[in-house]
Image (cartoon, grey):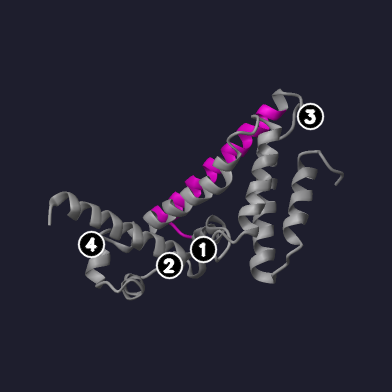
Amino acid sequence: MSPRRSQLEARQTRAAIVERAVQVSSVEGLEGLTIGRLASDLQMSKSGVLGHFGTKEALQLTTLEAAIQVFRREVWERTADAETGLPRLLAICDAWISYLERDVFRGGCFLTSASCEFDGREGPVRDAIASALSRWHEALGSQARAAIDAGDLPPGSDIAAIAFQLNALAMGANQALQLFGDQSAPQAARRAMRATLSLEPQ
């Protein structure tokens, strides 16, 4: 076997492990992710799985990053053509709720689940989750600031509060869908998001 083919197969194997890891941890959590479970699911040896990551923590971090990339693709990149500011913010809200409605992850929003799982802990996984959500809040705040500058939101609007409220509404919609099967939650979240952006009455 040539070195190039060997490297390709190693990358393909690693990608398959990560894909399965995302599927499993979407429902069972990052702590529910075990080398033994993945080895069994993929018909590999434990050492074969572990050899691609070194530690369970490294596997968790890789899995988290893969899930973040999916979120970025499904929400942020889908709205890339929208005008900066309020139009982009509205497009983000709609794409965000659509991401929840479509069950992109079987267990709902991956980051929401991970944040609840690790919020009281310490360590690199918790820090990576916090960093990802902080970046997301900053991205929302940036669009809110552009909307204020364009005159689409009232001057003096609290940018941090807007980002906080939009995130809280998305998390609430995720919980309503996943825990209660409430199919009315997405539309309720859309209305509440527009109210937060002063586009519909409270």
Residue type for callout 3 = Pro
Whether 174 is drawn above or below 191: the answer is below
Question: Main SS type for the magenta part?
Answer: helix
Residue designated by label 1: 117
State the mark number for residue 31: 2
Which structural element holds mark 2?
A: loop
Q: Which numbered disc flags the more N-terminal residue, 3 or 2? A: 2
Q: Which mark is residue 154?
A: 3
Q: Residue at x 85, y 47 (%)?
A: 202
Separation (CA) of disc 3 from disc 1: 36 Å
Q: Which mark is residue 51?
A: 4
Q: What's the CA distance linking mark 3 and mark 2?
A: 43 Å
Residue segment shown in magenta: 121-147
Which of marks 2 and 4 precedes in the sequence?
2
Q: CA distance from mark 4 to mark 2?
A: 19 Å
> Label 4 crowding class (10 Å Cα cut-off): few <14, some 14-19, many 20+?
few
Q: Secondary structure at mark 3?
A: loop
Q: Secondary structure at mark 1?
A: helix
Q: Which residue is nearer to you in this view: 141 or 3?
A: 3
